[in-house]
Image (tube, rainbow, N blue to C red):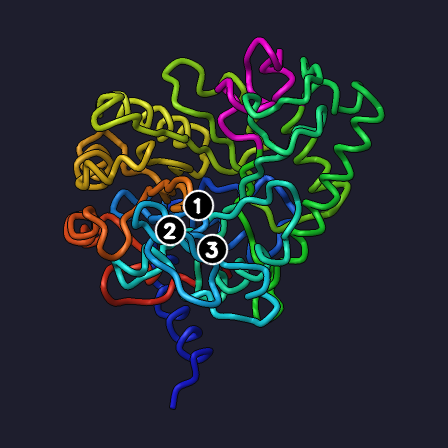
Amino acid sequence: MIRNEDKVQYNMRIILVFITCLCIKVRAFSSGPIDTQATPETKHLYNNLLALTRNTQTILFGHHHDTLTGAGGGRNPYRTTNHNGTKGWTFTSHQVHIKSPDDLSDVKSVTGEYPAVIGFDIGHLDNLDRARYLIRRAANRGLIITISWHQSNPISDSPSAYVSDDHTGVDIHRAIHQILPHGNSTLHSKFTVALDKVAAFIISLKDSSGHTIPVIFRPYHEMNGAWFWWGTNSKTGNTPYDYKMLFQFVVKYLKNTKQVHNIIYAYSPGKSLHDYLKFYPGDSHIDLLGLDFYFTRPFDPPLTEFQKLVNVLTDVGHNRNKIAALTEVGMKNSGIDSHPNFWSDHVLVSLKNGNGTTQLCYMLTWANRCSSNSCDVQVPYQGHPASSNFFNHFYKDPLIRFGNFTNHTGPSLSQIVG
């Protein structure tokens, strides 16, 4: 009997031939990740993502919290909820304790595969054991890991990153400036304590063989919007200069002070045709250029706007020799419930018909999650009205690749992460 480990190693050798061919095209002008001391696994992931960005025939599909939360019906020992007949599920800390398998996945329930990219969020910097457990299992499957950080407001101690949820009454004006070295010394010390926790967590990520797991780290995203404390609105008063200094400080602190060397750093503003680089921290602080784009309802914004913004992203990525990705994409308010063809007639059609819009290494959509009061569904689960179209017209399209890296059959994606 062939052991699973042997199968993975065999698959890694096969797919390496394909990846090596792709990398030849970019090796001549690839300078590697911004961290010159990056781990071998991180350099390997970086080079492969850059190669996939240049390869117009392949875009990986990703799903945030794919094995953490879902809407496709759960079972013990998962925590389950029911909202108007939609049965949500959540992987719990108790399951970490009992070393439970994390086999539930809404994407897998429809396609038979996990997504190629899986996202997690470190939020309040609590319950990190659960995130570590699921990241390790995802990495063992060969999936690519991306981490976002909806950091609690360090000025007001509001538990939410959203300005609208901050009911403390504390003045958060120029929040970014206050937590940087030349701001408020007490708040800066508090901020570095949080960064210490981030560093310890990311350094701790190891696969079952003890190898470092490289991650795409995407902090302080959608900075050109008004909803986060690090964003730009009259209440926060942050400036583009403030944001650049914040991102540069975080990179230098993690990389130089804390010696974290398994990070690919991502920049991902929200949709805007006018200010993509307005908050850009600089080429020496960014590995991956991203874009977060959500449709409010079917065909709103129009598909042409989506294509234009993806063109901006891919053009900037090409000109600056950076990895490019749709770091978030989807339709708000569970729009696929009423428009089941969304992934084929909004996303796939736009990317295939655009000029250069397939020069992306991956796209990632947000989590499926339910409570007893509401559900938010971005991808269909088995039995969902959109599941048939998603399987037949999105999943089966040769442009889109999932966790097996090739559709239907083919090698594991584990070679991507070292």
Residue 395 position (above or below residue 308): below
Q: Amino acid at mark 1?
A: Ser
- The residue carrying pointer 1 sits among few (fewer than 14), some (14 to 19) or many (20 or more) residues within 10 Å by Cα, namely some
First in residue order: circle 1 vs circle 2: 2
Residue 385 position (above or below residue 408): above
* Residue 118 disc label: none
- The residue carrying pointer 2 sits among few (fewer than 14), some (14 to 19) or many (20 or more) residues within 10 Å by Cα, namely some
Q: Which of these two is toward me, 40 or 252? A: 252
Q: Amino acid at mark 3?
A: Thr
User: Magenta segment, which residues?
Assistant: 220-245
Label 2: which residue?
82
Q: Extreme right residue here?
A: 185
Secondary structure under the numbered disc 1 in the rendered image: loop
The residue under the point 38% across, 28% down is 313
Percent across and percent down for residue 393 are: 15, 48
Label 1: which residue?
371
For residue 192, say whether it is visible.
yes
Percent across and percent down for residue 209 are: 58, 72
First in residue order: circle 2 vs circle 3: 2
